[in-house]
Image (cartoon, helix red, strand yellow):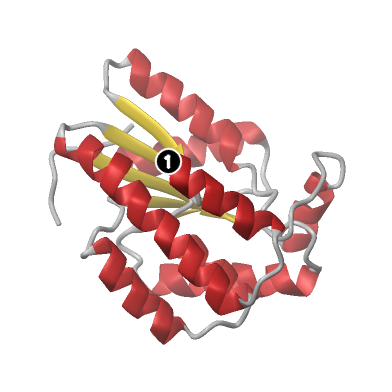
Amino acid sequence: MSSPGRFITFEGIDGAGKTTHVDALEQRWRAAGHDVVRTREPGGTPLAEKLRSLVLHDAMDAMTEALLVFAARRDHLQQVIEPALARGAWVLCDRFTDATFAYQGGGRGFDTVVLSTLEQWVQANRQPDLTVLFDLPPAVAAARLVAARQPDRFEAQDQAFFERVRSAYLARQAAQPHRFAVIQADQSPEHVASQVHAALAAKGLA
């Protein structure tokens, strides 16, 4: 599905450090005069934010989790993402469908064939123009999270869970390498920022 806008997503396990770099990119794009929409998943609309709270804090099985995430995504696409792209905005989204394949598919072990079917139903071929994947060892991510905040239901998972999440992210990247830029996120903030800039520049998005 083509559109005049640009759709860039940021992915990675909890503790990968995405937010700092999304903040910087948003500021740079706004300063350059772009119409920028900053959003997140699950979430981005009042309904989707309610579903996010359920997913992050209420116990449920993997199928329920996946269905709620895709329900939130459907509303998000209809209410925010598609209208923004149609008017030519540059959309920055913290997580999108790759996170569902990583967390519900890899982490929870849910059937990725079912996830692929839901992806097609909900997104109608909508995929990001670029997905910036912040990759780092789960042990490093866990150390970063220790003092950061009270963990939610996902952040409280053990290291083996995040190893599976990381592997699922990298498998997704290997299957669609044209769409991904992999950032080595266990480097200094300055080095990570330079990697992000290079990835965006390569797509004409810097």
The quarter of the picture where the N terminus appears is: bottom left
Q: Secondary structure at mark 1?
A: loop
Q: Is residue 83 above or below residue 51?
A: above
Which image quadrant for residue 27? Answer: top left
The percent coordinates of residue 22 (x first, y second) are: 50, 34
Which image quadrant for residue 35? Answer: top left
User: Three-letter amino acid code at disc 1?
Assistant: Thr
The percent coordinates of residue 138 (x first, y second) are: 73, 62
Q: Is residue 68 above or below residue 38?
A: below
Q: Is 140 in front, or is 107? A: 107
The crowding category of the residue bearing disc 1, from other C-alpha atoms within 10 Å (few below 14, some 14 to 19, many at least 20), is many
Q: What residue is shown with label 1?
A: 45
Q: Is residue 110 above or below residue 39?
A: below
The percent coordinates of residue 105 (x first, y second) are: 54, 76
Residue in view at x 44 percent, y 38 percent: 39
Q: Is 199 in front, or is 104? A: 104
Q: Is 91 in front, or is 196? A: 91
User: In the drawing, does residue 105 fall left or right of residue 32?
Assistant: right
- Which residue appears farthest toward the right when viewing the image? 147
Which image quadrant for residue 174? Answer: bottom left
Q: Is residue 73 above or below residue 148?
A: below
User: In the drawing, does residue 15 fall left or right of residue 98?
Assistant: right
Query: Does residue 184 show up?
Result: no
